[in-house]
Structure formats: C-alpha cells, structure tokens
Image: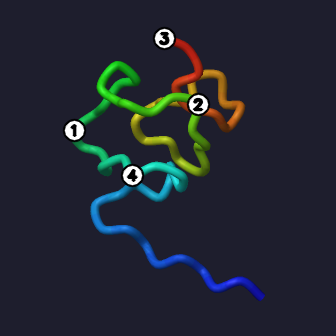
Amino acid sequence: MPIAEPPRANCDPSYPDVCIPPYPPDLDCGDMPFRRFRVVGADPHGFDRDRDGIGCESG
C-alpha cells in the first residue's frame, strides 16, 4: 500500500502535481508558470474551465 504524501504547506490540494497557493487571492492562468496540470476536487481558482481534469490548457 503506497504511503500518502503529506500536505505541502501553502499548496492547494486541488492541484496535486504543482504548488499553487490556496484561494484567496484568486489566481488566473496568466498568473501561473504552469500549463496542463492535473485538477482534482473543488478547483477554487477555476483553472479547469471545461472540467476535464486539466488546468490551464490554453493560453
């Protein structure tokens, strides 16, 4: 059984593969250096507009 990774300080768990600060403040894809990252759960920043589980797919 894999060991769960501990929560990263000041990283929102909705974005498990990158460290994005929790809301607030609201961030947009233009504020992020990351593209095409996994989104799970609530997506408080709204990075996954088409709700396919991938954030900041374009632009």
Vertical position of residue 10 compared to residue 30: above or below: below
40 to the left or right of 9:
right
Residue marked by disc 4: 19
Residues under numbered marks 3 and 1 in contact, where contact means CB atoms less than 8 Å apart = no
- Give the secondary structure at mark 3: loop
Whichever of labels 1 and 2 marks the residue nearer the N terminus, that label is: 1
Question: Looking at this rendering, what residue extends furthest in the front direction?
Answer: 33
Direction from residue 18 to residue 55 in the image, left or right = right
Position of 20 relative to 53 (above/below): below
Label 1 amino acid?
Answer: Pro
Give the distance between the C-alpha atoms of the residues marked 2 and 4, in whole angstroms: 13 Å
Alpha-carbon span between mark 3 and mark 4: 20 Å
Structural distance between the alpha carbons of marks 3 and 2: 10 Å
Q: Earlier in the sequence, mark 1 or mark 4?
A: 4
Q: Which mark is residue 59?
A: 3
Check whether the beta carbons of the residues at disc 1 and disc 4 lie within 8 A of each other: no
**Separation of residues labelled 3 and 1 (CA atoms):** 21 Å
- Contact between marks 3 and 2 (CB within 8 A): the answer is no
Among numbered discs 2 and 4, the one appearing first in the sequence: 4
> Dot 1, crowdedness within 10 Å: few (<14), some or many (≥20)?
few
Q: Which residue is mark 1?
A: 25
Query: Upstream in the sequence, badge 3 or badge 1?
Result: 1
Q: Earlier in the sequence, mark 3 or mark 4?
A: 4
Read off the residue under disc 2.
Answer: 36
